[in-house]
Image (spheres, rainbow, N blue to C red):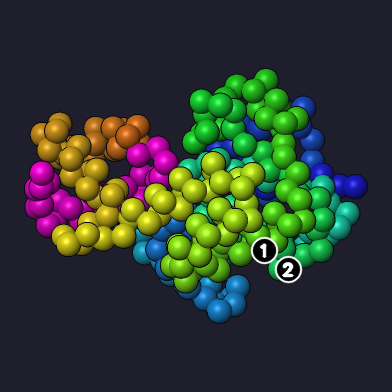
Amino acid sequence: MKVTHILNGDSLRQQLPSSISGNVIVARECLVDGNVQGDSLEALFENRAQFIESYQEVAHGTYNESSVPEFEKMLKLTEDDKIFVWFEDDLFCQVNYWFVIYLLANYTQVNEVFLVRPNRGNEYSFGFMNESQLVLSYKNSILVTGDDFAQIAKLWPLFQQENYSKMLDITHSALTNYEFILKPAIKAQIERLPDAQGLGRPQRSLLAIINELNSKEFAVVFRLFCQREAIYSFGDLQVKRMFDALILRDLTIEN
């Protein structure tokens, strides 16, 4: 039996204790952001490459060179692999997790998958955990049983379809052991839907912080946003895009 770890990012790869052995695959994605459509993996990856590389900071070809090969490694996993998937509870991580489970369920024959979560108090970040805490989380990993595995795999296509009510239904009826993780993440996604001003919860929160601090300095606003909206765990690229759009529109928060 081979051990394979699927990690939520390169930061965790650098942080992973040397005492935890096995092959490592990194899910280099931010599927919570941008175009997630595609009737095939090829179409999805093409759409993702176009979106990711629309960021000025991302060079052309980066997605196909850096992200796609990692997913292709996942597709080659077999029933001989004992897989540990390392994902946090925030929306950013959860969407990537749903996609990874979808890949494993629909494109491989794997039958042993374990979820590794951060410890209490660090639900949204492995980054604050020390080596001994990471080892303990690994030892406390949860076997994703066959029924749960199949149900979690359904969340990704529903996310693509923006069928959030069905996602909540599955969570409540068939994934009760994971409802405390899934329900807040799905609700956070629903709260991203635009209001009459065309703004979702993250944009409204950014506006409130800008007004509260009376500052349009991104670094200052970003730090407070990350504290208040940890459920999203957006990176600086995602928040900067929203921030710039708000500044361009010169909106003010409504009471």
Residue 150 appears anywhere in the view: yes
Please rate how many residues cluster around mark 2, counting C-alpha atoms within 10 Å: few if below 14, some from 14 to 19, many from 20. Answer: some
Quick one: SS at disc 1? helix
Give the residues in magenta: 229-255
Q: From the viewer's perspective, is residue 43 above or below residue 55?
A: below
Say which residue label 2 marks. Answer: 107
Residue 161: image location, x then y, percent? 47, 71
Query: Within the magenta stretch, is there residue 153?
Result: no
Say which residue label 1 marks. Answer: 103
Asked if residue 241 lies left or right of residue 3, the reply is left
Of residue 143 and residue 44, the one placed in the foreground of this image is 143
For the point 23% across and 43% down, which residue is it? Answer: 206
Residue 60: image location, x then y, percent? 45, 65
Asked if residue 211 lies left or right of residue 97, the reply is left
Mark 2 belongs to which amino acid?
Tyr
CA gap, disc 2 and disc 1: 5 Å
Q: From the viewer's perspective, is residue 52 above or below residue 136?
A: below
Residue 71: quarter of image: bottom right
Mark 1 belongs to which amino acid?
Leu
For the point 24% across and 32% down, which residue is it? Answer: 220
For the point 52% across and 29% down, which residue is it? Answer: 122
Of residue 104 and residue 62, the one placed in the foreground of this image is 104
Asked if residue 250 lies left or right of residue 156, the reply is left
Please rate how many residues cluster around mark 1, counting C-alpha atoms within 10 Å: few if below 14, some from 14 to 19, many from 20. Answer: some
For the point 53% across and 60% down, which residue is it? Answer: 169
Residue 97: image location, x then y, percent? 59, 52
Name the image quarter holding the C terminus: top left
Q: From the viewer's perspective, is residue 164 above or below residue 82?
A: below
**Is mark 2 in CB contact (under 8 Å) with mark 1?**
yes
Query: Within the magenta stretch, is there residue 236?
Result: yes
Residue 59 appears anywhere in the view: no
